[in-house]
Image (spheres, grey):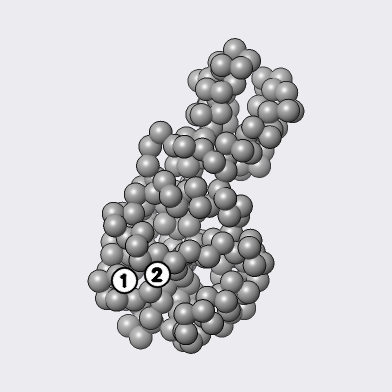
Amino acid sequence: MVYNDIDSTKKAFVFELDNVLYPEKDYLYQVYYLFASFLEYTEMLDPKAMVSLMTSTYEEEGHDAVFDALQRQFNVDAKYAQNFQHLMANAKLPLKLLLYQQMLDLLQEIVVDRKKLFIVTNGNPEQQLNKIRQTEWHGLEQYLICYFANEYTPKPEPDTIHTLIKEHGLQLRDLVMIGDSKNDEFCAEASGIDYIEVGNFISVPLK
């Protein structure tokens, strides 16, 4: 699917961030590397082995299982959970986050066509903003309008979409949401706006 396949009457596009505009693992893996380096310095643990464990745990069980796996395998003190969470929200990444090429092309075409671009993202607002600030937008950042759903009510609740529509003088028929989860799909349905699964645009694995 490409931009020209989308209803040309749409005036605004709403995107989730993680695994829609860029691969979330690109952020997480860099944070895992930084955290392993921190534990190497403070506890003299093997950073390569920790990174390997964290990435494999993420792939097999998800991010929420990562710190527990470190505790079990390396006897990491529970006090470091706070450091892990702080780093997850505020890390200065070694490398910029890169958009999926297909999504970069799509965003550029939307801007050229003078349509509005919104990011409506779930999750810790501090962390999500940190990701946005460290993404290579190729100049598109000046056109982005970001809403952090947790500051209203997280998706699938439609509150953020209703706020967006009101603040920007839009109609329901003007919007289309592009996401990757049931939360996004149900949010679009509850809001009364069209929804497109991101898999229609990108051909790479989401993890």
112 sits to left or right of 14 = left
The answer to whether residue 206 of the structure is visible from this angle is: no
53 sits to left or right of 132 = right
Circle 1 — which element? Answer: helix
Circle 2 — which element? Answer: strand
Q: Residue at x 56, y 16 (%)?
A: 41
Q: Residue at x 59, y 72 (%)?
A: 160
Residue 11: x %, y % from top left: 38, 81
Residue beneath disc 2:
117
Residue 67: x %, y % from top left: 66, 33
In space, the residues marked 2 and 1 are separated at their CA atoms by 8 Å
- Answer above or below: position of 15 versus 174: above
Extreme right residue here?
78
The picture quadrant where one finds residue 189 is bottom right
Q: Residues within 10 Å of mark 2 (few under 14, many from 20)?
A: many
Q: Residues within 10 Å of mark 1 (few under 14, many from 20)?
A: some
Image disc number at residue 149: none
Q: Amino acid at mark 1?
A: Ile
The picture quadrant where one finds residue 36 is top right
**In-front residue for pair 192/86:** 86
- Answer above or below: position of 102 versus 114: above
- Answer above or below: position of 106 versus 63: below
Q: How many marks?
A: 2
Instruction: Decide which of tag 2 and tag 1 comes sooner along the chain.
Output: 1
Residue 132: x %, y % from top left: 45, 52
Residue beneath disc 1:
110
